[in-house]
Amino acid sequence: MYTKNELMFPHYVIPHLREARGPSWQKLVNHVLSLPETHEETLAFMLTMIRLNGCLPCETDSYRAMRGCAMCSLQTLRRFKGSDDELLAMYREALDQVRAYLGASQQVPATYPVTVAQMV
């Protein structure tokens, strides 16, 4: 019954959101889709949607979760009362935060006990 439940906004939903808003939103979605899934701009888009959708408190047995992430995201975007410019501002803020996080995480001291190679 819950085979496609996600914990947070999944990457595969992004193409479904292209037509949910106006031209500037469509341009952003097209741009993000041209990037790898792990690119900082893609991560920022996903973070924006996680915040907008309220993914963190979502429960697997909630109505939203049972409908799926794509339907939840489309409904959220359609109900959003702000402009596309406001959505883009939310995205830019998330992008700044992702970049700040990635910059901070890359400054791990060389003496840190665990390397990525050891984790794999």
Image: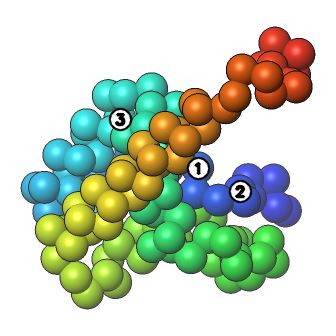
| Mark 3 → mark 2, Cα distance in angstroms | 20 Å
The quadrant in which residue 93 appears is bottom left
Q: Residue furthest left?
A: 23
Q: Residue at x 49, y 37 (%)?
A: 103
> Of marks 3 and 2, which one's residue comes earlier in the chain?
2
User: In this rendering, is residue 31 above or below 25?
Assistant: above
Is mark 3 in CB contact (under 8 Å) with mark 2?
A: no
Apparent side of residue 77 relative to residue 62 in the rendered image (left or right): left
Q: Residue tagged by mark 1?
A: 10
Q: Which element type, helix, strand or loop, lies under badge 3?
A: helix
- Marks counted in the figure total 3
Q: Residue tagged by mark 3?
A: 33
Q: Residue tagged by mark 2?
A: 6
> Of marks 3 and 1, which one's residue comes earlier in the chain?
1
Picture quarter with the N terminus: bottom right
Q: The residue under label 2 is which amino acid type?
A: Glu
Crowding at label 3, few (<14), some or many (≥20) Cα neighbours within 10 Å?
Answer: some
Is mark 1 in CB contact (under 8 Å) with mark 2?
A: yes
Q: Residue at x 31, y 81 (%)?
A: 80
